Amino acid sequence: MARLQILELPEVFVGEASETPFVLVVDEYEPRRYIMGPDQNEQPINEFDGIAEKVGARCILAFADTVDIPANDLSGYNGIPGGDYTAFAATVGRVLGIDTSSVAPDVAGWLLTACRELEKSEAAREQLRQERDAQAESLERVRNLHRPVDYRGTMICAECSAFGGSTTDNAPVAHNQCGTLHALISDQLADA
């Protein structure tokens, strides 16, 4: 079962007030599996979307592995904050791909780096979604221009044939011979 831990980051001073930012760390997490229907083309919503903002956390880090944050371990507590961050640093380094080989452990710095990378990846995913949607709209407009129409019992490409309702300005082009649609199909096959 997933565990929830809080990792406090260094205190931040805003004017005369101070705040202690924190990160929620979820470990032993097993993501839910979603079965997408044939008409679904969007990924399911992330289970953690919006939670960090609601609780005031900088971000949420979810790990499948067990992550022990030494600051949360009170066994053998001797009044000195912190502890041995070696195991935690190794987990951060392995899972997030962050270099943790520095001599002095900077866990807060590593986590801030992880948060920034997460924000970058979320922004990149959103930009890719927007680009994908714009490309899909462009393809749909091209397909609508090169739609099949019936011309004297033959299906022709409306755009290539310059179809004007009852006549064509160009020589009729059979719809299955439309060069534009062939190019779209070959581009889609090359991307697959």
Image (spheres, grey):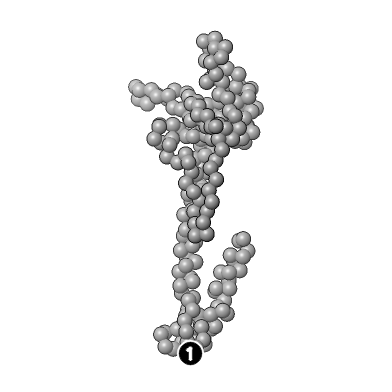
Q: How many marks?
A: 1
Task: From this view, report whether residue 168 is shown above or below residue 54.
Answer: below
Residue type at mark 1: give it.
Arg
Q: Eyeballing the image, is 108 above or below 75? A: below
Quadrant of the image containing the C terminus:
bottom right
96 over 101 or under it: above or below:
below
- Residue 63 appears in the rendering: no
Above or below, comparing residue 117 to residue 189 in the picture:
above
Measuring from the top left, give residue 177's x and y in whole percent.
Answer: 57, 80
> Looking at the image, which is closer to me, 15 or 157?
157
Residue drawn at point x = 50 percent, y = 29 percent: 4
Identify the secondary structure beneath mark 1. Answer: loop
Where residue 155 appears, as percent x and y from the top left, is: 51, 83
Give the image location of residue 5, x and y in percent: 50, 27
Residue assigned mark 1? 152
Looking at the image, the residue that sits furthest to the top is: 78
**Residue drawn where x is 38% and y is 22% of the image:** 18
Kindly tell me whether residue 38 is visible in this rendering: yes
- Residue 40 on image: x %, y %: 49, 57
Compare residues 33 and 84 and report the one nearer the observer. Answer: 33
Give the camera-side residue of 148 and 108.
Answer: 148
Image quadrant in which the N terminus is located: top right
User: Residue at position x 47%, y 39% from top?
Assistant: 48
Determine the residue positioned at 40% across, 31% down: 56
Q: Nearer the viewer, residue 176 or 115?
A: 176
Q: Residue furthest left?
A: 16
Q: Which of the 4 image quadrants contains residue 13? A: top left
